[in-house]
Amino acid sequence: MEVLLSAEDLAAGIGRLSTAVRQEVGRRPLTVVGVLTGSIVLVSDLIRRLECPVQVSMVWASSYRGTATSPGTLELRLDLLPDLTGQEVLLVDDIFDTGRTLEALMQELRRRGAASVRSLVLLRKAGRAEVAIQPDFVGFDIPDAFVVGYGLDFDGAWRHLPYLAALDSADIAAARAGQRSHDAEPVPQADPAGVPRA
Ligand code: IMP
Ligand code: MG
């Protein structure tokens, strides 16, 4: 694994994102809708840096990827959402890859009568978009690699890493072969910034 963004890099990115959201939303109430499961760390860091009245809700989305690179059928669950009529909504996801998840969720949230729906992602992968829309707020543009950590997983593993790492083909092959390489410690982080390992 190669560390792409350290815990410090990520914290700085969240700082920039929250400043941009604060500038746009001001003190008006905001409904933050996180996309389970990958956005949990981002949502928790982001909302603590907002100054407006915030409500938090979650939806669930999954596009099954057996190969880590090819998106599959998109499955959405929105039954936890409150009434969004007239709300200013910020949809928060971990990564914009093909964009299909964000596009489908934006449509659903608009259909529910929100006054406005904006989107925020931590990461946007280069050269992968298959939709016309782009996120309103992007933390980092990254190369086309499969990444894990800070909420993002490969087959359920590595979400808890406090940094973002790119998997190489050996990591992916080992995970596919069922060697559960994620049970071993991955590449040591030079400076984990005091964030405890899970
Ligand atoms: P999209 O619909 O293709 O934009 O895919 C978005 C979803 O795919 C994200 O919410 C992630 O759950 C997942 N995903 C895409 N790329 C990666 C990756 O590199 N690592 C982990 N999950 C990813
Ligand atoms: Mg996701």
Image (spheres, helix red, strand yellow):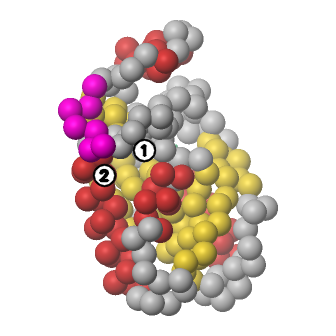
Overall secondary structure of the magenta section: loop
Does 53 appear above or below 136? below
- Outermost residue to the left: 190
Q: Residue at x 54, y 52 (%)?
A: 40
What amino acid does circle 1 point to? Tyr
Question: Sequence order check: which comes first, mark 2 or mark 1?
Answer: 2
Q: Residue at x 74, y 73 (%)?
A: 82
Asked if residue 143 lies left or right of residue 41, the reply is: left
Span highlighted in magenta in the image: 188-194
The residues bearing labels 2 and 1 have C-alpha atoms spaced at a distance of 9 Å
The residue that label 2 is drawn on is 10
What amino acid does circle 2 point to? Leu
Residue 114 in the image: x percent, y percent?
64, 82
| C-beta proximity under 8 Å, tags 2 and 1 | yes
Near mark 2 (Cα within 10 A), the count class, few <14, some 14-19 or many ≥20, is many
Residue 190 is covered by the magenta coloring: yes
